[in-house]
Image (cartoon, helix red, strand yellow):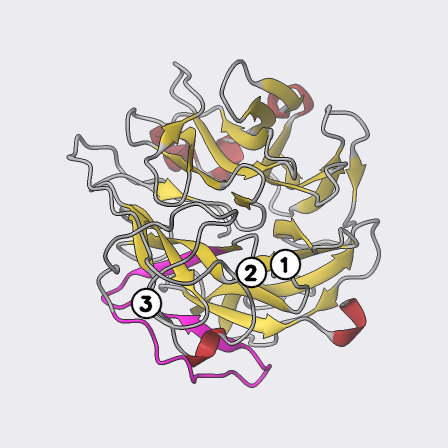
Amino acid sequence: MRIRALTAVAAATVLLLAGCSGSGSGSGSGAEEGRTPGPSAPSGGAPPTGEPPTGAPSAGAERRADGARLLYRAGGGRSAQNPAFAPDGRSVLLTEFGEGYNRGEAALAVLPLDGGAPRTVLKDPDRAAVNLPGTSWNAAADAFVFATDRESGHDEVWLMRPGGAPERVTSHGDAGGYSEPSFSPDGEWIVFQQSWEPEHTAAARGDAAEQDSLWKVRRGGGAPVPLVDGRGTGTDNRQPNWSPKGDRIVFQRRGVGREDWSLWTVDPDGGGLRQVTGVPGEHTDPSWSPDGRYLVFSSNLGDLPNAQVFVVDAAGGTPVRVTRDDTAYDGAPSWSPDGQWIAFESAPGGEAHPAALWRIPVPTNLR
């Protein structure tokens, strides 16, 4: 998901649908052969139960020339985005936008990868619940983390255990938003993006208005801790993802008013800021390989007509292109826990169109 367009806020009755009776959490193997209801909890908890989103899943046999295989396509103009593997690799958490790419209300669903339709786990009418690709789902916390405006006019960080109810983590009074959260490997901390501008102001002024910062907060709540100061450095910092070892956090950054994004990493205490990508382009949506050696991300590197999925060494170097369909935008990638697959969202014709979820084998030289 390149840049999130937030939905309009309206008072609503909450509809909570705990998703998925049956098998699994997000893995990359065998997913295209069908789906059955239900992910198991990542560490043995009760699986969520609920009803499938409207719109039928694809039969799963569709493949692209670059080897990517379809996981799920929603119907009726809805957009399936932000795949994040569950710790056991048997399902993926996803966000489904109701009115197209990054548009309309947004619900969370879990897609089992050994058969069956995705099951909605949280849906609030006229509200947006959005997860981040990468480390949204954590085994130690037995929960996934996300952002939603369900109780306020701005986003806050929430978490949810499979089969449980949403639990609010943050509370703040300004008109900005707390969004794009991801877990530390031990499940004790959550890193997130702080948007300074109110949603309507940012929408009117464009992305140049943003000087987002990065913070972390304890899973149980409390005072957030600053990590990267966007306003203080004149930069826009977004979509943080914690490394598997817990020693680094990757994120995308640009100077205010610039179009190019680059990938950076920072220590969990806010020190050791380092740039990873130096080549021009919009390098976004970064997350880690399970061994922490590589970063997977989306980029228009080389002036591609649509962004594609790339991998780069976490210490820097030349990015390696993974997906190869110039007619579609490919983004929001996540690496499977077994290291074999990369799941991503793809919008044919570009981001003006609804996205579907796909997976592609990791190149053998990167496993």
Position of 68 relative to 158 (above/below): below
Disc nearer the start of the sequence (3/2): 2
Indicate left or right for 96 with 41 as reference: left
Disc nearer the start of the sequence (3/1): 3
Estimate the x, y position of residue 330 in percent, counting from the top left: 53, 65
Q: Magenta residues?
A: 56-83
Instruction: Give the main secondary structure, helix, strand or loop, of the magenta stretch.
Output: loop
- Identify the residue at horizontal 73%, vertical 23% (top origin): 269
Q: Residues within 10 Å of mark 3 (few under 14, many from 20)?
A: many
Indicate left or right for 229 with 101 as reference: right
Residue annotated with mark 1: 337
Q: Residues within 10 Å of mark 2 (few under 14, many from 20)?
A: many
- Identify the residue at horizontal 49%, vertical 31% (top origin): 209
Residue annotated with mark 3: 117
Q: Quadrant of residue 29?
A: bottom right
- Nearer to us in this view, 364 or 278: 364
Whether label 1 touches label 2, CB < 8 Å: yes
- Nearer to us in this view, 130 or 202: 130
- Amino acid type at mark 3: Ala
- Identify the residue at horizontal 48%, vertical 23% (top origin): 196
- Identify the residue at horizontal 54%, vertical 64% (top origin): 27
Residue annotated with mark 2: 89
